[in-house]
């Protein structure tokens, strides 16, 4: 059991090799560099290393609560979670979690093919993806077939934005700290406007994003993409990229320019730039949204749930998470109720700002 920063280089290389051999997309949230960054802002972050003889054959990044309750690393923030294991390893979830001295192990974005934990999932969700493996032009042709009105309207708004506001410029990997600060301010305002909890009001998340913005590793690199009109940033996104996957994380835009749909324009330019960089997949993450429905080419399954040890551990997990999860799932499964809940959240957001 190690803190992420205490992993040796041999263990890190083995971790990377296991990810490279996996059949699932190489999501940067599942790399040791992400675990390192989380470990610097979350003191309870740990990595369980499984050995076969002297050979490391598995890793479980996680966080341990005060009473032995465990959860996936950066639970509630990370968009891909789970164990990194050698194929065919003779291990079950209970054995691994008990060896970590945990009474439970909760996850909310468990990636597909995590056979060790999927049996303990309480719900399955769709993570929406954009496939640009065959190039951006092919992706645009897919959009013309499945969402012709959306594409035509968005491209027309992009041209109008350039004419009426200023010449458009897109930077795929912007290093200007001012652009990151602008993005975080827009996103905080969006959270408040829609009545949701402001993630950037939590110091550890803000520190984590700043740390990852400086991370440059082949399979986990912070990537800030910015759409400028003239010299003014009007939309931006911060996420993580590997050689093959761009994990979309925090998109936002300046609401002064809402009528031009700058967020949609930004995502099209991100897809174009990612394809040019050799990235084959943009992972838009879990959670239904109209813009995702318009942009997506497919879906991946992610899971929410927990392994729990019978007894006090199971009771603590259930009391802390399950009622809220069930209520959320009940509402999301009923469109009229979900729409009413969204209106209530926006009303609450307006009251908070007044």
Image: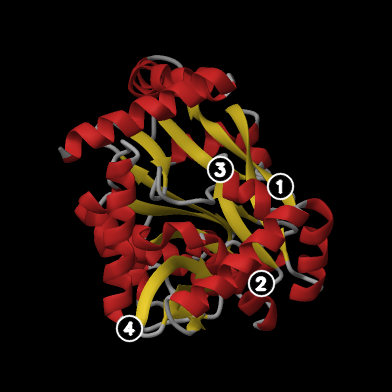
Mark yes or no: residue 208 visible. Answer: yes
Q: Residue at x 74, y 74 (%)?
A: 136
Name the secondary structure under disc 4.
loop
Q: What residue would you read off at disc 2?
A: 244
In this rendering, is residue 21 above or below 284? Answer: below
Q: CA distance from mark 2 to mark 1?
A: 17 Å
Question: Which of disc 4 and disc 2 is earlier in sequence?
Answer: 4
**Residue furthest to the front:** 164
Q: What residue would you read off at disc 1?
A: 299
Question: Which of disc 1 and disc 3 is earlier in sequence?
Answer: 3
Pointer 2 local density, CA inside 10 Å: few below 14, some 14–19, many at least 20: many
Report the disc number at residue 176: 4
Q: What residue would you read off at disc 3?
A: 289
Name the secondary structure under disc 3.
loop
Pointer 4 local density, CA inside 10 Å: few below 14, some 14–19, many at least 20: few
Q: Nearer the viewer, mark 2 or mark 4?
A: 4
Q: CA distance from mark 4 to mark 3?
A: 29 Å
Out of 224 and 155, give the one closest to the viewer: 155
Contact (CB < 8 A) between labels 2 and 4? no
Pointer 3 local density, CA inside 10 Å: few below 14, some 14–19, many at least 20: few
Question: Which of disc 2 and disc 3 is earlier in sequence?
Answer: 2
Q: CA distance from mark 4 to mark 1?
A: 33 Å
């Amino acid at each position: 059991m190690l803190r992420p920063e205490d992993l040796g280089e041999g263990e890190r290389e083995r971790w990377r090799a296991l990810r490279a051999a996996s059949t699932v997309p190489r999501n940067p949230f599942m790399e040791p560099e992400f675990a390192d960054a989380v470990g610097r802002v979350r003191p309870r972050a740990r990595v369980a290393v499984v050995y076969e003889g002297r050979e490391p054959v598995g890793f479980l990044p996680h966080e341990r609560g005060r009473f032995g309750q465990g959860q996936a690393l950066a639970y509630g923030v990370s968009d891909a979670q789970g164990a990194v294991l050698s194929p065919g390893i003779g291990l079950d979830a209970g054995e691994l979690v008990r060896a970590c001295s945990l009474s439970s192990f909760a996850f909310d974005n468990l990636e597909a093919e995590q056979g060790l934990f999927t049996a303990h999932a309480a719900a399955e969700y769709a993570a929406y993806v954009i496939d640009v493996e065959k190039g951006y032009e092919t992706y645009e042709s897919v959009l013309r077939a499945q969402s012709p009105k959306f594409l035509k309207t968005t491209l027309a708004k992009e041209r109008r934005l350039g004419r009426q506001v200023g010449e458009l410029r897109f930077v795929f990997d912007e290093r200007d700290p001012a652009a990151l600060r602008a993005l975080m301010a827009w996103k905080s305002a969006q959270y408040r406007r829609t009545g949701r909890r402001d993630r950037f009001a939590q110091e550890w998340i803000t520190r984590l994003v700043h740390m990852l913005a400086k991370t440059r590793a082949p399979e986990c690199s912070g990537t800030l993409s910015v759409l400028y009109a003239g010299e003014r940033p009007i939309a931006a996104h911060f996420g993580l990229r590997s050689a093959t996957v761009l994990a979309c994380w925090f998109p936002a835009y300046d609401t002064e320019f809402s009528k031009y749909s700058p967020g949609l324009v930004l995502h099209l330019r991100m897809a174009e730039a990612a394809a040019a960089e050799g990235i084959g997949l943009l992972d838009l993450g879990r959670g239904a949204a109209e813009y995702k429905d318009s942009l997506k080419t497919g879906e991946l399954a992610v899971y929410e749930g927990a392994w729990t040890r019978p007894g006090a551990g199971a009771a603590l997990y259930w009391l802390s998470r399950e009622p809220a999860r069930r209520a959320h799932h009940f509402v999301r499964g009923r469109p009229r109720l979900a729409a009413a809940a969204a209106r209530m959240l926006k009303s609450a957001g307006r009251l908070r700002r007044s």
